[in-house]
Each structure stands twice: as C-alpha cells, then as structure tokens.
Amino acid sequence: MSKLLEGKTALVLGVANRWSLAFAIAGAYRREGARVILTYQSDRQRQTVEELGEELGAERIIACDVTQEQELEQLVSTLKKTAGKLDAVVHSIAFANREDLSRPFVETSRSGYQLALEVSSYSLVAVARAVAPLMSEGGAILTLTYLGATRVITNYNVMGVAKAALEACTRYLASDLGPGGVRVNAISAGPVKTASARGIKDFSKVLDGVAAKTPLRRNTDPEEVADTAVFLASDLGRGVTGNVIFVDAGFQIMGL
Ligand code: NAP
C-alpha cells in the first residue's frame, strides 16, 4: 500500500521530548513516508531534540524561537536552501506563566496575558506568513488547540483565551492562504500528559474526570492525534480548511 505522505516535506515545530504531541505527529509523518524537519526553541532542548530527530530519521534540526522574527527568517532561509519547498507545517507550541494556570483568571497580569497570546496564538500567524512562500505548490498548516478555547476549564485560564484567538487565527489564515492552495486547520486534542500540560494545576484530576465521562471512557492517545494530523497533511484532507477537528474520545459532545 502506498504511504499517505510519500514525496512530501513537513516542518514540525514543538518537539520538546518524547511525550510532546509534536513527537507523535513527526513519527506518524515519517511512518507515512514524509521527509521531516524539526525545530527546537533554545539550547536547553537542543540535545534532546537532536537525539529524537535521529531516532525518527529527521532530515534536519533547526533552532527557532517563534517569538523572534529574525529566527523565523533564518529558518525560512535555511529551508529555502535545503528543502526547497514545504508541503506541511505543524505548529505545536504554547506557553503561559505557571502562576496564570493556577490562580483565578481574573488575576491574570497584563504581561502574562501578552506572553500567552504572543507565544500560543500570534506565533501561528508569524509562522504561516514565514512559511507560505515555501508552499507555492499548496500545502497544509496545522495547529493544536484545546476545548478550553470555548468552555471554561478550571485553571486553563489565559491559555483558553489564547486558544480562542488561535482558533480564530486558523479561520482567518485559511481564508487568506486558501487561494494559494494552502489549507489551515486545528486539532483540538483531549488532555494528554505532556510537559506543558503538567504546568496546569490539578491536571491529573482533569485526566481522571475526562476518562470517566467521555463517550469512549478513556483518555486521548497521542497516536490518535498524530493520525488525524496525517489525514490533514495528506491529499485525503484536500477539501478541509479553516476547521477545528476534535480528537478527544468524544468528550466535547457531552453535556450533563
Ligand atoms: P510540549 O511537549 O511541552 O510542547 C510545547 C512546545 O512548545 C515545546 O516544544 C516548547 O519548547 C514549545 N515552545 C514554547 N515556547 C516556544 C517558543 N517561544 N518558540 C518555539 N517553541 C516554543 O506540550 P504538548 O502538550 O505537546 O503541547 C503541544 C501543543 O498541543 C500546544 O499548543 C498545546 O497547547 C496543545 N495541546 C495540548 C494538549 C495536552 O493535553 N497536552 C491538549 C490539547 C492541545 P520548550 O520545551 O523548549 O519550551
């Protein structure tokens, strides 16, 4: 059987360690035959991401802090020289101050709000603008969001606001880039134990609560998120853009 991403090149931003959703996605992209390029934010993660890249058979590992316009320009210039074109870009990045994920939302500081929105929402716009010229033959941009964008989830706080903005950015970018054949979508993943998720106070209670109430009576497996990411990057997803697709074992349909 032919592989779904054969002949495609994917840039995956947001691998920090082997629990990262981006790591599962990069692995599934490799499984489906894509060439994969990874980025890391700072020297702190460099060695880990290089080791994981080697394990995956990633073609290249490049430094990129998405809040630094210069680093995005450098990333694109390196990609122009090496990969030439991109078919898929995965934005799997978020950050908020820990104190803003544990105290009442009303106490969010101006600087904490700006930081969360800058890293977790605006960066999708910056990344899309930077990579679009490398997608002249069309392509797929994908980001990761969470139900806290539209519902109040205890302690998710400013990150919920950032995800609401991220989902709106997904729609506006899909509209702007669609005429050039670039699709932009978001996967809304159910809670998964990752480094970022551990920053949310009482996250393990969320995992237990979801597993008990969700239609499939279990938590989300990162591999399920990754397989949907394959679909969206592949030609099978060619008609899908501007969407938020839930991969959450069904949790978001539930009322009482
Ligand atoms: P993760 O492994 O901690 O990934 C978050 C990534 O964001 C890390 O690689 C981190 O790099 C990177 N990052 C933060 N600031 C950055 C910056 N300025 N420039 C470049 N990279 C930066 O956690 P994850 O759960 O897989 O998160 C990936 C995405 O999935 C996030 O958007 C998250 O909100 C979303 N999501 C997660 C869940 C969940 O339950 N885990 C559910 C739904 C959606 P460093 O580690 O080097 O800082």
Image: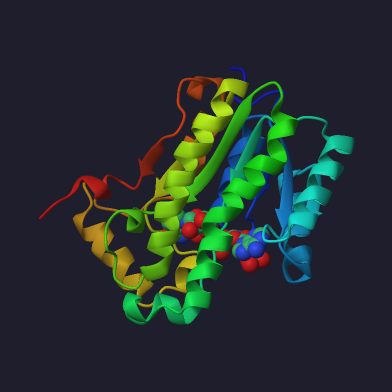
The answer, for residue 16, to whether it is visible in the render is: no
Residue 130 in the image: x percent, y percent? 71, 42
- Seen in the picture, residue 138 relative to 50 is either above or below; the reply is above
Q: Quadrant of residue 134?
A: top right
Q: Residue at x 80, y 52 (%)?
A: 62
Horizontally, is 72 left or right of 205 in the view? Answer: right
Drawn side of residue 135 relative to residue 161, left or right? right
Q: Which of the 4 image quadrants contains residue 140?
A: top right
Residue at the top extreme, as displayed: 1
What coloring was used for the rendering?
rainbow
Residue 137: x, y in percent? 69, 21
Quadrant where the C terminus is found in the figure: bottom left
Report the side of 124 relative to 148 (left or right): right
Q: Position of residue 199 (x, y in %)?
A: 47, 74
Give the farthest residue toward the right.
81
Measured from the top left, where is residue 64 in percent x and y? Answer: 74, 57
- The answer to whether residue 33 shows anywhere in this view is yes
Residue extending farthest to the left is: 256
Q: Nearer the viewer, residue 78 or 39?
A: 78
The image quadrant that residue 103 belongs to is bottom left
Give the quarter of the figure containing the N terminus.
top right
Give the residue drawn at x 53%, y 37%. Answer: 173
Q: In this orientation, which residue lies closer to the viewer: 71 or 22?
A: 71
Residue at 37% over, 53% down: 190
Q: Quadrant of ligand 1?
A: bottom right
Q: In terms of depth relative to the viewer, which is nearer, 129 or 18?
A: 129
User: What is the number of callouts on the image?
Assistant: 0
For residue 204, above or below residue 15: below
Residue drawn at (41%, 78%) of the image: 108
